[in-house]
Image (cartoon, coloured by chain):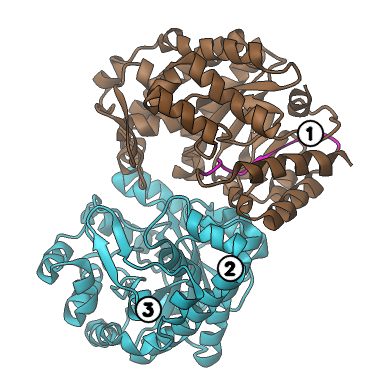
Chain colours: A cyan, B brown
């Protein structure tokens, strides 16, 4: 698989591409399945439907990898937290985790309960072409903890930051428990058939540098090293969003560093290009204009070279008002321009 | 004034400190005046009340500078845009600017109409101790434009980014008009008595590097250079939030670069310390813990040295659930530790 070769730093005939949130609301065929499922969480829980939306962007766009359709919050959900998605507001936990007793009540064996995810993976891997990769994923312990402590999305993170600075032991206990669950979750995803795993640290930018490494990066690296020790051939990809200022201190045994668009690709290459394969990072909004797409994509490929070791992606997820035709234009452009 | 000396790179007997959003909801005396005003916009419009809340943190905390109490959106409001603050949701413009005709209808002479701001400044400057500085401010053209195009706060900026990539001339026309108004606004603030001016680019991080310099930084520098040419002794401070990845390309004639907490102070010093005075950058949430405050503040002062050329500040604004006593603790700590 071109995608897996690229992840492992091998030469590739062209630069592979996939797009974060490539299975999503900008696709009319996704909206149909979403409607059939009734709501977002139902869709995550229904293997056949989740498999279908996982496969849609591969068919429509010709991307080199599918990414499992699911949500990062199924993990705390199966640990025992009641989860709702409130229209226009996003995820909501009825009972946030604020005390050690709350934390103790959460199930450490939640990975065994996420059977619908493993079932989705099996269906996708059967139906997906052999030369296309399937990426499994999880939220990072820190990113999951922010939702679990706050109970919902937040602009200021002030409830969880208060805990970080005032009750660091409590937060570490939560992160350790999540780390345990996530290791088992990724192992089971791999056993079910994913070809690579990715850890999304969507709320990395909530923490200042020193605190970030202590409360987030360390745990992601622990998970990555656990997976690499057990499955050396499975690429592990990390995506810490918004930490352009912390690149001097990145460490750990993983394969791919996902670069968000606020980190210039040339800077990422300078700081990390010798150690890791880089994935990224076109600003998604360039998809509003073919001209901006062409310029942005070519510039990134010119910076990263065409000899492998780079995976093209957006620097953040697809937006609902994008046109699938524009996404297809980008995929073809990257394939053509990088294979010359 | 210690604060002004520090801004201009002169040696100071101790490191001056003020805090972004130091006049705000965490202060009970602010809440009283806010209640008297009825709503937030009324408070901005009432010079006596706005002056009172501007002065409160100087009295309570002993900070070295007051910052004018106002809102960045009074500028588009006086340009003709109907503005509301919706409880729990933030600012809202009933009629966003989406066409050239919308833009043409906005008043270029709005600076002359912001008389309540200049009146506030006159009152504060009369009542403020002579050794304390008064900082005037504005939003950057880009940050104001995001609200004017979107009509409200946004997570994705997708409406204004669509314009940036599809209709760049339209966005530039808006930014040029705002730049004109802001120049006049800052000039009048200076004539009314402010000792320094600051440009807040709160939504800097909405744009990728190349686009950021074209659509935001260039205009801020144009304003800064206009002010420095006319008032060479008035310090000009810029605060672009969240651009740790772009520091290699910072340029322009201004005095103080405001460092947010996502940019490590050592990195800012390495990249910009020879060219600009740095202001910042303690992660505000450290104020939840005296121990975290002490460690964080000392570390920043140790990095920046005690010989002047540094202004201590938070790396973002005060939060409503902070305790004023903790803020006072920080001010005393910075004064004491830096004067040794």
Q: Is residue B312 magenta?
A: yes
| Numbered tag placed on residue B163 in the rendering | none
The quadrant holding residue B75 is top left
Name the foreground residue: A87 vs A129: A87
Residue interval drawn in magenta: B307-319
Q: Quadrant of the N terminus of chain B?
A: top right
Q: Nearer the viewer, residue B84 or B240?
A: B84
Q: Nearer the viewer, mark 1 or mark 3?
A: 1
- Of badges 2 and 3, nearer the viewer stands 2
- Is the residue marked by circle 1 packed among few (<14), some (14-19), or many (20+) residues within 10 Å? many
Instruction: Identify the residue shown where x is 67% and y is 17%.
Output: B128
Q: Looking at the rendered structure, which numbered label has been put on residue B309?
A: 1
- Using residue A104 as the reference point, say whether residue A46 is left or right of it: left
Return the disc, 2 or 3, that comes first in the chain's sequence.
3
Q: Are marks 1 and 3 in contact (CB under 8 Å)?
A: no
A95 vs A119: above or below = above
Q: Which residue is mark 2?
A: A215
How crowded pointer 2 is (Cα within 10 Å; few <14, some 14-19, many 20+) is rated as many
Q: Which residue is label 3 attached to?
A: A136
Assign a secondary structure to mark 2.
Answer: helix
């Amino acid at each position: 698989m071109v995608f897996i070769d690229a992840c492992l730093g091998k030469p590739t005939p062209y630069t592979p591409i996939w797009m974060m949130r490539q299975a999503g609301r900008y696709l009319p065929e996704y909206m149909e399945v979403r409607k059939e499922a009734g709501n977002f969480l139902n869709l995550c829980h229904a293997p056949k439907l989740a498999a279908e939306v996982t496969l849609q962007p591969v068919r429509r766009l010709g991307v080199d990898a599918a990414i499992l359709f699911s949500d990062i919050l199924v993990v705390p959900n199966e640990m025992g937290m009641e989860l709702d998605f409130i229209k226009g507001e996003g995820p909501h936990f009825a009972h946030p985790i604020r005390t050690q007793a709350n934390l103790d009540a959460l199930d450490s064996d939640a990975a065994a309960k996420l059977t619908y995810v493993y079932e989705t993976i099996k269906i996708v891997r059967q139906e997906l072409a052999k030369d296309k990769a399937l990426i499994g994923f999880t939220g990072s312990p820190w990113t999951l903890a922010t939702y679990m402590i706050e109970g919902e999305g937040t602009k200021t993170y002030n409830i969880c930051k208060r805990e970080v600075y005032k009750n660091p032991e409590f937060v570490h206990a939560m992160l350790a428990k999540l780390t345990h669950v996530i290791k088992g979750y990724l192992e089971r995803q791999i056993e079910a058939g994913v070809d690579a795993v990715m850890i999304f640290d969507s709320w990395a930018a909530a923490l200042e540098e020193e605190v970030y490494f202590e409360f987030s990066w360390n745990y992601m690296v622990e998970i990555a090293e656990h997976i690499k020790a057990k499955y050396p051939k499975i690429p592990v990809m990390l995506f810490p969003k918004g930490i352009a200022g912390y690149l001097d201190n990145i460490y750990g045994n993983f394969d791919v560093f996902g670069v968000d668009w606020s980190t210039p690709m040339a800077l990422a290459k300078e700081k990390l290009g010798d150690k890791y394969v880089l994935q990224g990072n076109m600003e998604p909004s360039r998809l509003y204009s073919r001209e901006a797409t062409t310029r942005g994509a070519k510039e990134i490929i010119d910076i990263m070279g065409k000899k492998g070791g780079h995976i093209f992606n957006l620097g953040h997820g697809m937006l609902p008002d994008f046109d699938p035709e524009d996404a297809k234009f980008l995929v073809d452009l990257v394939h053509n321009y990088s294979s010359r």
